[in-house]
Amino acid sequence: MKKTIFFILVFQFSTLFSQNTWNPVNTGTSTSLFSLSFPTNQIAWVVGQDGLIMKSVDGGNTWNVQASNVLNSLYGCFFPTTTYGWAVGWDGKILKTADGGNTWVSQQSGTTNYLNSAYFFSTTSGIIVGENGTILKTSDGGNTWNSITSNTTMILYMIDFISPTTGIIVGQGGRILKTTDGGNTWVIKNSGITADLFTMHFINANIGYAAGDFGKIIKTTDGGETWTNITTPNSTIIGTIWFSDINRGWAAQMDGNLLYTTNGGVNWKSDTSFGITAMWTSFFTSPDTGFVAGNDGKMYKTTNGSILSNDENNYLSKADNQLNIFPNPVKKEAEIDYYLASKGLCLINLYDENGKKTNCLVSEVKEKGKHQLRFNSDKYESGVYFIELITETEKIIKKLIISHK
């Protein structure tokens, strides 16, 4: 299983690139933590070894244990709202809460394969992946789970969706699967490598990275259709990767290296000054605020994650369109910032979990430069949505989570 491969992920930071700092969070436990989920920037859950589930209601500063009533290690969790959530793990275990974690109920998965990762579009629709190519899908809140053909027996480690219908799974042996119909069918894509892929991160609907064993990082610029290998300084396992924009990215390795790029992965800097602690999960609620957590209940938080030195800022290019949403998840209002590389017609659309366009937020000619849009979520139900920015030269899609409760 994913957590028994014992790849030791280094993500404990005493100093990070200029003024970037990570501070320890007292979780109150020494049990290993495997997966974080923040349905809002204040309310969060983390799950871990031996059935551990903990909740925070103050932005991750303090954590309280919730009773899972199981001893199965839990490797993944996902909360589409602050009341509904799922945790998955060893021996096919699936747990669901419908009351913010006050009570957790086991669901029948129909498998004893261990489950690594979950993605939920709403309180009723979701997908889980795991051992032996397992893909499970529900459309009734987990009352029933249907097995989806994956065309592989490889371990599947992580799932994410980059649009309402397009999703990516990464896994063992360099396996990459892609769906364009909301997860009903999956097609194997050529990653170009045979190393296990434990993690991925997509900046937008086109550009994404996957990483894993032997220090391998691969990049796609066409939404996961094709992948190219990226040269890294060494061959140590990478356990997690995160990009804050098209230029800046981080990859943590087992030997104490934290790799950092300011030019989209073309070149990587290596910092070896960090202590070695296995970190299994990370979650950022904004470009500045993020968390990492892992072995022995260790967790760290940054509130200035996007601060760079002047030299590093000089790398950042404004040659491309950009789209950012904050806060995300959205409780009531959000600020949508977008940068246009040139003057032209600009469309910003909102899509629901099924790919249906629910609103056109912007449709006009805009000048080159930065623009801002206030988004009010009052008339929308809680769930996963997608914001689409279309110009004459590019399309960018970003996930937007609405959580009213």
Image (tube, helix red, strand yellow):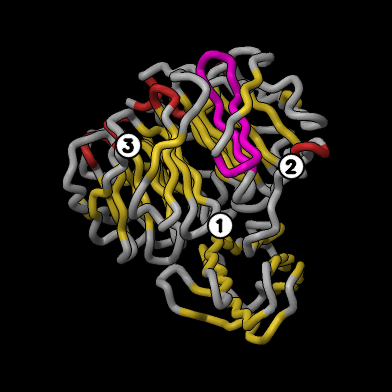
Rendered residue at 75%/38% (across/down): 312
Mark-to-mark CA distance, 2 and 3: 29 Å
Q: Which mark is residue 81?
A: 1
Report if residue 53 is visible in the image.
no
Rendered residue at 55%/38% (across/down): 266
Work out which residue is located at the far bottom of the displayed protein and give it: 364
Query: Could you tell me the amino acid type at mark 3?
Result: Gly
Query: Could you tell me the amino acid type at mark 2?
Result: Ser
Rendered residue at 70%/58% (across/down): 318
Q: Which mark is residue 100?
A: none
Q: Which residues are magenta?
A: 248-265
Q: Which residue is mark 2?
A: 306
Q: Position of residue 324 (x, y in %)?
A: 67, 60
Q: Is residue 317 magenta?
A: no
Nearer mark to the viewer, of 2 and 1:
2
User: Is 292 on the left or on the right of 78, as rendered?
Assistant: right
Nearer mark to the viewer, of 1 and 3:
3
Q: In front: 257, or 30?
A: 257
